[in-house]
Amino acid sequence: EEMADETGADVWLVDYALFPDATGKEIAGSVVDVYLEALKKHDSKDIAFYGNSAGAALCFTVCVYLRKYMLVVALPGMIVSHSPCIRIPTSLNEQEKMNLLDQKDIIIPACYVNMYAERPDLFQTGGFEEFASPIDSERSSLPRTLVVFGSDEVFLAYLPAIIRKCREDHVELETYVGKGRHCYCAKGILPEAHAGRERIYAFLCGERRPWETMSEDLIEDLNRNQQGELDAVIMYRMLADRMDSETDANAMRRLADDELRQARIFRKLTGVKKVPGRTQGDAVCLLYRTMGKAKLFRLMARGEYAAVNRYSALSVLFPQLEEVMEDEQKHGDALMGLC
């Protein structure tokens, strides 16, 4: 109802079949049946496919179905795919990314997709093998497409493959990543859903934006993390000056050098020059005097390990942050080794 109000469009709801009561071919066919009815009243270029989760993947799958079985039927003018699962089974890299995001996604666990790969009795394609992985099919004929993901969902791991394939096949693709979990835009009571919905409605109304965008919340995260890395440089340098052992002091200086390199990586992403602060360093130096080295280093190590999880979603969007995550893990290990 809201989509109709915001876009002025007629909205057709598709009650499609589900596994294991239907095969993949039958599921896609049930969506095509509704599309054929819509074509009796509307021109194909004026029709958009919109879907969430399984329905989001169907937006792609139905287009592949039409190209394989019904070439005379024109594709819709637009696709909006919200949190799609576009490859079963996942690639090794995608599964690794999903495992990193697993702690954040309380809706879809990382093992979800593998369940279908391991249970062929549940997942029957009915001869339409492309149903399982529409991302691997020919996509050059796909219409203008918007793909939306939440930063804290495991399916975000699919985004690099979608971008890569659409670029290869010259599909007009726009992406939007907001701070939220699986299908977060569908949950209208959530504040973070509003910006995502506005992005979707603008797309459906024909507005074109930069092909790859993030919510303001995620941009703020990038800036905040850049500042955090810069502040850590000062913190480790201040600690180095207070260490009783030259070995510990040298370790702090190495960590400071790593943090500076990480801050520079973030600066390349944000394009913003920031000034480091010493508030964190003052606080940690005070704790060093009151808590002692062992307790403080264990506390700091937990912070470094937490950063690995904090950067997990951003590393999917910006692979260069994988280096930062590896450093944070090493920093935690180094601090624990000094306790």
Image (tube, rainbow, N blue to C red):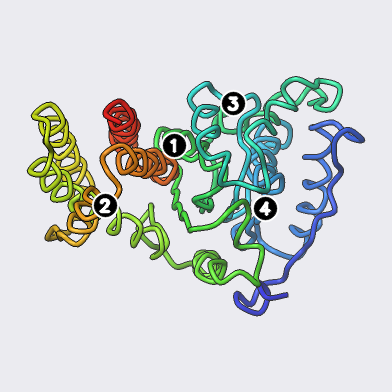
Asked whether the residues under the numbered discs 4 and 2 touch, taking CB atoms below 8 Å apart as contact, a structural biologist would say no
Q: CA distance from mark 3 to mark 1?
A: 13 Å
Q: Nearer the viewer, mark 2 or mark 3?
A: 2
Q: Is residue 75 left or right of residue 124?
A: left
Residue 265 x/y as whole percent:
20, 43
Residue designated by label 4? 52
In the picture, which quadrant includes the N terminus?
A: bottom right
Residue designated by label 3? 90
- Name the foreground residue: 181 vs 149: 181
Q: Earlier in the sequence, mark 4 or mark 2?
A: 4
Q: Earlier in the sequence, mark 2 or mark 3?
A: 3
Residue designated by label 2? 290
Where on the picture, by quarter, is residue 71?
Answer: top right
Where on the picture, by quarter, is residue 125?
Answer: top right
Q: Earlier in the sequence, mark 2 or mark 1?
A: 1
Where on the picture, by quarter, is residue 278?
Answer: bottom left
Residue 160, numbered label: 1
Q: Earlier in the sequence, mark 3 or mark 4?
A: 4
- The residue sitting at 65% across, 35% down in the picture is 64
